[in-house]
Amino acid sequence: REGGEASPSAAPASTAPKPHRGDSDSGEEYDEEKDLPVDIQCQLLKHRANEAFGKGDYAKAIELFTSCIALDPHEAVYFSNRSAAHAKAKSYELALRDGKKAV
């Protein structure tokens, strides 16, 4: 490639609509978020999970922390936070399992 020209095989940015991956409970769409770097996706999910936890919606918090773990299974804080949510939901064996994974 001379003169800084783009490779002819480089695909142009897609203008086609993205498939819907909305959260059926809240109506929120995550289409644009799935294109973000994984660490940013995790930060957004963790924020939502912490909000749900703070509101006492432990099932939602568990679901969101589980999504964080799916994206980054090596981050101990997601297991620790999900453990706390399981404990609040009185799922003590699951809380213990996640707690052990966090340490």
Image: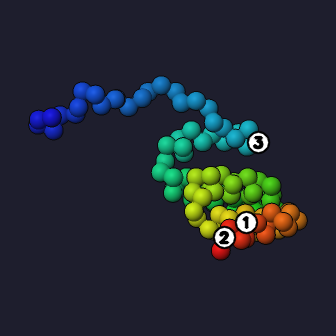
Q: x and y percent of residue 75 in the render?
A: 58, 64
Q: In the rendered view of the protein, which quadrant contains the C terminus?
A: bottom right
Rendered image: mark on residue 102: 2
Mark positioned earlier in the residue sequence (2 or 3): 3
Residue under numbered circle 3: 25
Q: How many residues crowd around disc 3 within 10 Å: few (fewer than 14), some, or many (20 or more)?
A: few
Identify which residue, 34 or 74, lies in the foreground: 74
Mark 3 → mark 1, Cα distance in angstroms: 25 Å
Residue at 23 percent across and 31 percent down: it is: 7
Q: x and y percent of residue 88 in the render?
A: 84, 67
Residue at 57 percent across and 62 percent down: it is: 74
Residue under numbered circle 1: 98
Identify which residue, 95 or 45, lies in the foreground: 95
- Mark 3 near mark 1, Cβ–Cβ under 8 Å? no
Residue 88 visible in image: no
Disc 2 versus disc 3: nearer the observer: 2
